[in-house]
Structures are given as structure tokens and as C-alpha cells.
Amino acid sequence: MICFRRKTDAVMQILTVLWVYRRHPRFIIQFAEAPLAGINYHGDHVSAEDVLPGNVELLRGSLRPGDGAISFRTHRPIWQRIFSSRQNENPDQLVDSLLSLLPEVFAWWETKTRGPHLRLLPVVHLPGKPKFPEADQCRKSPVRASRIHYIVAHSLKLTGWCSIAAFLALFWAPSAPALLTAPSAMDIFVFVLATLAAVPLGMIFGGVLLCPFVHVIGSKINGAPFREGDRVRILVGPHRDRIASVYAVWKERNQVRVALDEQAYKDVKDVFGLTQVCREKIAKPAAESDSSSPLPTS
């Protein structure tokens, strides 16, 4: 990665060239601006000389080439290589193309004008560092939640496997009588082809079409919507059956962040979907429950 910085009277303008190697070398142009005083990121102060455009708390974006790709590269898209004898672009032309697009970045820095080749990202204000529980409060609860909560926590896998099973039953039904009696080579071929087709179709139907509906229903079963301060039980992963407090709600992504420990906070390993946690019921005090019982009669 190569980083360029330009200091103005009010902000630090940052531009980076991020190299990416995916079969063919390519690079991504990112830009941002940061206050001269720096920013606070995960409770730590980051100076303007050290902050990078990938920080979600900055006004930032990326510069994209005119062919719809997200990166600049010399190799052409496969659909262009099929219909053309030229496999790669001239590196000099690639550099000239990049230089012709850079004025859009400069215009954004000066007047916040969004050019046609700029992709701007929204500013995400990260929550402050939560108050982590004491060591003796970090143990997992011995009481398990209802089984239905654990089932909906794996809604993606559940809908995927159920959809695959449904497609297998649908495709196998026509060829089942022939396979059980005297299967021919064609019957076996159709059986194998139907099996291979049922798996991707079931994954697409379950993951793309069915899973969103199951996710909405499952989140309601688990107690959503959640708010900051709610006590929830984690249903998946290494922190399963651990009870923690919600300190941030990401409504756009249908996720919550819970207070586990400082390492999980820094690594952003405390993020869970709405179906992966369930609301923890608050037990009534013993005095309250005793007062509701009838008095003994003599």
C-alpha cells in the first residue's frame, strides 16, 4: 500500500493505492479526509498522520474506472477477451486513464462534488468502549434457552438444507419407480443430474428467497427488536450460552454488539445477528414471588 497525504488549513487529505493480487495484479484507489486533531477509534486516539482511508469514521470513498470495475487492472474482463484478440490493456493507457479521473477526487476534496467515477461510503460512528463485566460474571449460564431459540439461530443452514431436501424429493419423484424396479442407464443419468441440480437450486431458494422470511420470524421469536442495555443470551459460537448486555444496535445490518471482553471489542468479534441472540428473561425477586402466594389459613 502506498499512502499520500496533503495537509490543508482544516483537514488532512489522504489518498492510498492499495495493491490486490487475485490471479492478476490490480490496485484500488481510496481517498478520505480526516480532522487535523485526529480521531478516536475503538477508544484509542489515532493522529491524522496515521489514519487510513479504510477507517469507517471518516468521510471516505473510492475511485473506480469507467468500465464498472472496482479496481484498476491491465487484464481485460473475460467477456471482452472472448470477443477480442487483445487480452490485456496497455499499462501506459491505464496510467493515463487514472490520471484523467483523479480531478474528480480533487473536486470532492474542495467542494464535495461527487463525480461519476466516485463511490462514497457513509460515515459509521462506532459506539464507545462498553463497560466489560468482571471475570466472575463472564461464565456461561448453566440454564439453557428453549430449543426453538437454538434452531432459529441457524436459520440460514436450516432453510438451505430444507430447500435442498425439498428439491431432491421433487426431482427424484418421477424417476423413483424406475430406480426401484429395473433402472436403466438413462434413469441413473437422470437421477444423478437431478441430484446435482437440486443442491444449487435449494441453496439459492433457501438462502436468497426463504431465509429472509425465516430471519424476520426467528428474530421476533428471540425477542427482537433489541435496545442498548438489554440482557441477551448468545446462541452460537464459542460464547454460546453466555449472557451479556447489548451496547450497540446496527439496524441497517440487523445485528447487535454485546459486551464480552476488550479483545473481542477490538477485533469486532462481539457482533451477532438478531437470530443469534435471544432476550434473557429477568427473574422475579424471591420476595415478590412469595408475596403473590396466598396466606395459609388456620
Image (cartoon, rainbow, N blue to C red):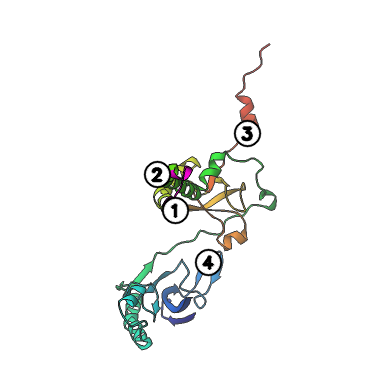
Q: Residue under circle 2?
A: 174
Depth check: give the residue in front, 139 or 126. 139
Q: Residue under circle 1?
A: 185
Decide: is 77 above or below 156. below
Q: Which segment did they paint magenta?
A: 178-194
Q: Residues within 10 Å of mark 4 (few under 14, many from 20)?
A: some
Q: Position of residue 156 (x, y in %)?
A: 48, 50
Secondary element at tag 3:
loop
User: In which quadrant is the C terminus drawn?
Assistant: top right
Residue 207 lies in the magenta-colored region: no
Q: Residue 41 carries which label?
A: 4
Secondary element at tag 4:
strand
How far is disc 2 from disc 4 in space, using C-alphas?
A: 60 Å
Q: Residue at x 49, y 61 (%)?
A: 126
Left or right relative to 143: residue 225: left
Q: How crowded is mark 1: few (under 14 residues within 10 Å), some or many (20 or more)?
A: few
Viewer-nearest of discs 2 and 3: 2
Badge 3 amino acid = Pro
Q: Position of residue 73 (x, y in %)?
A: 40, 79
Viewer-nearest of discs 3 and 1: 1
Q: Which of marks 4 and 3 precedes in the sequence?
A: 4
Q: Which of marks 1 and 2 precedes in the sequence?
A: 2
Secondary element at tag 2:
helix
Badge 4 amino acid = Tyr
- Residue 15 visible in image: no
Left or right relative to 149: residue 136: right
Q: Which residue is drawn at 36% across and 88% down?
A: 92
Q: Which of marks 1 and 3 precedes in the sequence?
A: 1
Viewer-nearest of discs 2 and 4: 2
Q: Which mark is residue 285?
A: 3
